[in-house]
Amino acid sequence: MDWKKALKAHVAGKPTRSEEEKRSEETQLFTELYCQWKGVQPNRQHESFKSIPKFYFKLPAEDEVLQQKLREESRAVFLQRRSRQLLDNDELQSLWFLLDKHHTPPLMGDEKMINYEDFLKVSLEAGPKCKTYFTATVFAKLLQKDPYGRISIMQFFNYVMRKVWLHQTRIGLSLYDVAGQGYLKEADLENYILELIPTLPQLDGLEKSFYSFYVCTAVRKFFFFLDPLRTGRIKIQDILACSFLDDLLELRDEDLSKEMQESNWFSAPSALRVYGQYLNLDKDHNGMLSKEELSRYGTGTLTPVFLNRVFQECLTYDGEMDYKTYLDFVLAMENRKEPQALQYIFRLLDIQNRNYLNIFALNTFFRAIQEQMKIHGQEPVSFEDVKDEIFDMVKPADPLKITLQDLINSSQGETVTNILIDLNGFWTYENREVLVQENPVDDLENFGEGEEV
């Protein structure tokens, strides 16, 4: 038998099938074989399958305009319904009057209290919207050491106000959640803050031409601390849980003190300070910072080795740093006690990409400090002494390696990084005992203004 002719005849006798038919046949064959292997009959589902709800809903594709529009409209209706379920100002005022009316004597100083029995009476009169707040669990959480088993009506009212604010803010943020997946991308958060600016009296003096820089400055703090892995998105839940929104909305206070404004990253003076520093560093006025220009940051005492690492690891454009990258750098340098800032700096110190610092890495950075000391006419400190001090401060799990977690756990991350990357920081550490006895503020200010080490 000629097998070639037989094969040709077999193929010629079979009708041509489409790719879809072939895939369908493959799927059917796989299903039969899999069910045979598992010992179940195909096309026979367990009764419990009928009660399992669908947990995955595929997002509409970009070209599915109708489905996208339907999804957006349904989300908007849902958020509006949730918003109507919240207490408005009149309802909150009525709740306060009821709490005040049913408070339980005697007074605790000037503070009015309420026991559980009167608490339930208020619950019945307050209406269905307040029902979720009048629970035994909430009462127990607010219960303190009152001898009559009461809670403060002011504390309870503040609790309700806080809950209402959180829900309102979540709904407000969700309106900018284009994907509807519970997180905001950078552009989403930028739009939210841009539209928030007119509602913040403390930002009334900002020029509209500065709005884009202000929004960039504000958004970078959220992403630096809440997205350390640089995924490009932040969970709305994380935004609500941190204190940054509180700081931002604090700018609604028209009487905010100068000290509070200066310590608030989102205030106009703070944003103008950071942007002003950037402009002062940009000597050639090209809108970017070179390595030489960044070397003048702060007191101008960051070591060349550290600056080289900044430009090796951070995003640059033709070897220069833009404002967004600069903001990350500033946030890291100004918050060196925070884990996210230490993670940023640790990545720069980890020159061998081993996820730990060994003696070689420490020596590489401290050698630059020694060279700076020679330039300023000082006798360099022995690396062995500094190395031993660093390991004594950090107390790593491995006596020869310092991991990021070791640095965070030790609470000495700021001191260690000061010693390794900044001559001014090392000088401050070396002279800490003298500075404590004298006036450390004056000494540091003088040094920062140009005093040689």
Image (cartoon, helix red, strand yellow):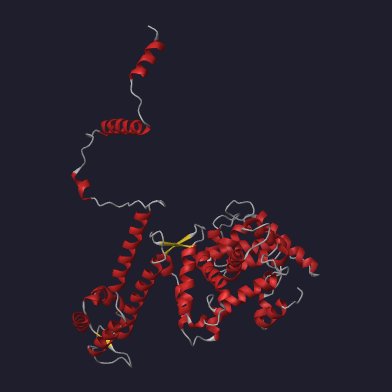
Q: Quadrant of residue 173?
A: bottom left
Q: How many marks?
A: 0
Q: Quadrant of the C terminus?
A: bottom right
Q: Quadrant of residue 67?
A: bottom left
Residue 408 as seen in the image, left or right of residue 37 = right
Q: Is residue 277 visible?
A: yes
Which x, y percent locates residue 221?
53, 68
Residue at x-position 20% and y-position 80%: 120
Q: Quadrant of the N terminus?
A: top left
Which x, y percent locates residue 17?
35, 28
Which x, y percent locates residue 3?
39, 11
- From this viewpoint, which residue is outermost toward the top? 1
Residue 362 as seen in the image, left or right of residue 87 = right
Residue at x-position 46% and y-position 82%: 252
Residue 440 as seen in the image, left or right of residue 144 = right
Which x, y percent locates residue 79?
32, 67
Q: Nearer the viewer, residue 385 or 21?
A: 21
- Asked if 378 appears above or below 102 in the picture, the reply is above
